[in-house]
Amino acid sequence: MIVIGGDAAGMSAASQARRRLGPGELEILAFERGDFTSYSACGIPYWVGGLVGGPDELIARDPATFRKDHIDVRTGHEVTGINLDARTVTVRDIAAGKDITEGYDVLMYAAGAVPVRPAWADNPASGIFGVQTLGDGAAIEAWLSSFDARDAVVIGGGYIGVEMAEALIRRGLRVTLVERSGQPMSTVDPDMGALVADAVRGLGIELRTGVAVRALETSDDRVRAVVTDDGTIPADVVVLGLGVRPNTALADAAGIPLGDTGGLATDLRQRVTGPDGVVDGVWAAGDCVQVTHLVSGKSLHVPLGTHANKQGRVAGINIGGGYATFPGVIGTAVTKICDLEVARTGLSSKEAEAAGFRFVTATIESTNRAGYFPGAVPMTVKVIAEKDTGLLLGAQIVGRAEAAKRIDAFAIAVWNRMTVVEMTALDLGYAPPFAPVWDPVLIAARKAADKI
């Protein structure tokens, strides 16, 4: 078994296959281009912001640990070619500068994703960073520690962009967040995004929405400013949070078919599929694959570590002779900006409309605890439900302490195709330190049910 990619999906697959097949039954060889395995890229903003140590604290299992389990991990090795007919891969030993060829019976493609880079971002000057790998985090940390940076510009107002803006504020920099769309966190509806925008500005971050970047100004091999259609912004450091796309160029060059999103299409067992059916001996998982949204039925690219670990586990169980499936996703995600928590699951209003649903929405204001209990703070909950049936299509939450994880109750309801009427009778936990007598989840479901 050859694994391409040493992070969540690839190493989960390797570990699960090894648990079922001993070293004498299956040799496992994993190639990783970088220096680390099984790490949390999601933790990079918190490392940069000084909330957690790194990079060691962000690594779940290092290569030495995998080798003890008879999984031969080779870091600093990049797979550069795949020959499906010969069942071989070509690998570049980066340090030695030489190529080797290895044969496989089973190929696990877990190459992850690559950052979206417009032409203006393709700039060799120093002080310009992505946030995809631990190496990126180390580079940002080294730059901030060795250079007296004062002005930072974060380009992209998604999850990583917002989290990095907060991290740089914590480091004492003046931060400008530039987002091309009309709001940060465009995965939530505009009314909920407005709450996020207020919180971002409340941190002292200058937020510019509806603004497009045109170029990066540099001199003396350093970034100096970001040029936008709304003026030029001084910058000693620029962080690119423009999203990612599936890393499938290697698969495409080998003739492995791609799905509609540009990611690899797989069946429920994580076998790669194409127009002619399953591609013999090739499995895939993680940020390089596309997934099915269980509410809209559409194929999507959703790069999250939760999905990567589950998909890798499913692939490894099947490769090892067991049986497991990954049915799809419903778009559950959470984040925080300082003490403001943001969560969503299912479809947003825009996504529900695009999927052809007739729907109603209901938005409520409540508190995380009984109103009289110390620490009670407000939260806003929005529910999207199918107009004729009351089927819960999605939910969004913006609030403070204990707000975001309430999205899990909605996620379970969406997953199990519950209606908002059914949700009003849910037996949720109650005590004044934890919730009002009517939990915000129930209040939102009841208001949506009234509209149905």
Image: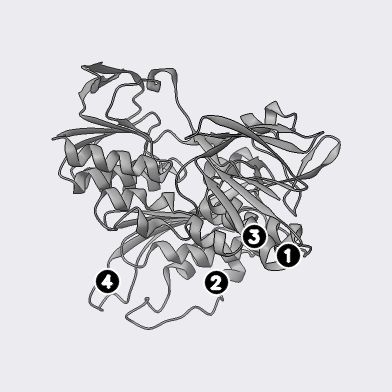
Q: Is mark 3 on a helix, strand or loop?
A: helix
Circle nearer the viewer, 3 or 4: 3
Q: How far from the left and from the top, in percent, is residue 299?
A: 67, 41
Circle nearer the viewer, 1 or 2: 1
Residue at x 45%, y 26% (from the top left corner): 117
Given the image, on which type of amino acid does mark 1 rest?
Leu
Q: How far from the left and from the top, in percent, is residue 209?
A: 33, 31
Q: Name the residue under label 2.
A: 424
Given the image, on which type of amino acid does mark 4 rest?
Ala
Q: Is mark 4 on a helix, strand or loop?
A: loop
Q: Name the residue under label 4.
A: 376
Q: Is residue 326 visible?
A: no
Q: How far from the left and from the top, in percent, is residue 444?
A: 47, 63
Q: What element carries label 2?
A: loop
Looking at the image, tell me whether mark 4 or mark 2 is earlier in sequence order. Answer: 4
Q: Is residue 285 visible?
A: yes
How far is the residue under mark 3 from the one under mark 4?
40 Å
Q: Mark 3 points at which residue?
A: 313
How far is the residue under mark 3 from the one under mark 1?
14 Å
Q: Mark 1 points at which residue?
A: 21
Q: Is mark 1 on a helix, strand or loop?
A: loop
Residue at x 78%, y 41% (from the top left corner): 273
Q: How far from the left and from the top, in percent, is residue 357?
A: 65, 45
Looking at the image, tell me whether mark 2 or mark 3 is earlier in sequence order. Answer: 3
Circle nearer the viewer, 3 or 1: 1
Quick one: label 3, few (<14), some, or many (20+) residues within 10 Å? many
